[in-house]
Amino acid sequence: MNLKHDVRAVARQFQIHGEFLEASPYGSGHINDTYCAVFDQGGTRVRYIFQRINHNIFKTPVALMENVHRVTAHLAAKVAGQPEANRRVLTLIPARDGKAFYRDAEGSHWRVYVFVEKARTFDAVESAEQAFKAAKAFGQFQKLLADLSAPRLHDTIPDFHHTPRRFAALEKAIAADAAGRAKLAKPEIEFALQHKAICSVLLDAKLPERVTHNDTKFNNVMLDDATGQGICVIDLDTVMPGLALYDFGDMVRTTTSPAKEDERDLSRVTMQFPMFEALARGYLSSAADCLTPAEKTFLPFSGKLITFEIGLRFLTDFLAGDVYFKVHREGHNLDRCRTQFKLVESITRQEEQMNRLVESA
Ligand code: ADP
Ligand code: GN1
Ligand code: MG
């Protein structure tokens, strides 16, 4: 297969023994270039994950890797000695020079992780049990990082979840209409403008800053093939200071609807209450004792806000001409925006019921 990158050459720069056999593109992430590479190690095929960090999006890859290194080391120390310790945390393979990354001649930064075997990610949730287990794993992740020592982690993308600034970026994209597409997205632009007032609610609530994942979509936790447990939280590029609710909100966004993020049949997009209940119970089962009453109160609202925020980002990128998220078809970002806004409506309809559940939990 002809790959976009020479993974074999990159592999020589990492401390991996054995013979490089092959590599192929892997996963369905929107940002980085991910490959699965296979090595022959004494007759055994061993897999690794190779990733090229997208430096158009992550402007400070060295600082980013410092975060990832600190976070994985902290988590590894916490679970050491427990069952399955080496599958529960991502393990970085050092480069030849001992660093956590390799910078190639073109200036791209690469990292390699041990492949977490006997587990997989899902692009859409299939059962309430999966939702419970994913949320429990993300809650545990937050909890284990609560005592990460100083200094503060780097902000790998400043204002990542600053919804009012995301809204301002959309307003700018509408005004510029760089790709001439505003006429194709009139109802979506209208929907966004109508909901402007919700953007600042979490920021105004003065909630505590914590170490959070910030990209807790359902396919960023690996579920164990045998037990279904959320065995390993992955995609650590945005682990940085944030609000606990950004993480819970993104779980609601990605783990309550049976449809994929880019589903075109909007009748399939809906906030399924049993999934929300499983998420809330799963998350609280591991993180409850870290949360303040105010944080708990906002759990349902966070789902609406983060879904709206990512919808704004997809719409902004559609209007800008698809410069941020990877797209695989015409109108892909607009399709993604539509599912998000449909889900916001579905959450709004059920918000009171969601609030009642959380109050009694
Ligand atoms: P992106 O930032 O582009 O979303 P991810 O880090 O989420 O990239 O990786 C993309 C996909 O690769 C994941 O959804 C997962 O299926 C797979 N993956 C990532 N890391 C590992 C790993 N250590 N072991 C096995 N699979 C992995
Ligand atoms: C991106 O990397 P990935 O595909 O897990 C994005 C998230 C969005 C998500 C939408 C760094 O996540 O913020 O919520 O797409 N990551 C970045 O699916 O922008
Ligand atoms: Mg991902």
Image (cartoon, grey):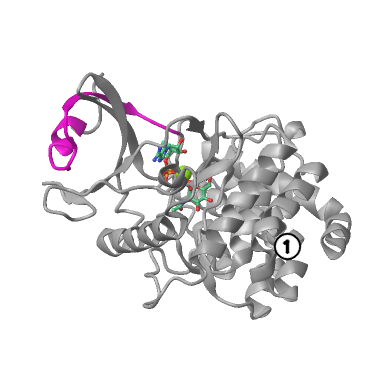
Looking at the picture, how far across and down is residue 242, in whole percent?
53, 69
Vertically, is 27 above or below 297? above
Say which of 251 and 48 sits in front. 48
Q: Is residue 238 magenta?
A: no
Q: Can you see residue 309?
A: no
Relative placement, left or right, of 212 versus 288 is: left
The image quadrant of residue 20 is top left
Vertically, is 42 above or below 215? above
Q: Please tell me which residue is depicted at 60% across the width and 78% down the height of the picture.
A: 208
- Start and end of the magenta stretch? 7-27
What's under tag 1, amino acid-wise? Leu
Secondary structure type for disc 1: helix
Q: Please tell me which residue is depicted at 34% across the width and 57% down the height of the picture.
A: 58
Looking at the picture, how far across and down is residue 28, in whole percent?
46, 35
Residue at which label 1 appears: 299
Residue at the farthest front position: 81
Q: Label 1: how many residues lie within 10 Å, few (<14), some (14-19) or many (20+)?
A: many
Say which of 272 and 210 sits in front. 210
Relative placement, left or right, of 231 versus 204 is: left
Vertically, is 171 above or below 80? below
The C terminus, quarter of image: bottom right
**Does the closest atom of ligand 2 sit within 8 Å of the Cβ of label 1?**
no
The N terminus, quarter of image: top left
Relative placement, left or right, of 147 versus 278 is: left
Looking at the picture, how far across and down is residue 127, in whole percent?
72, 34
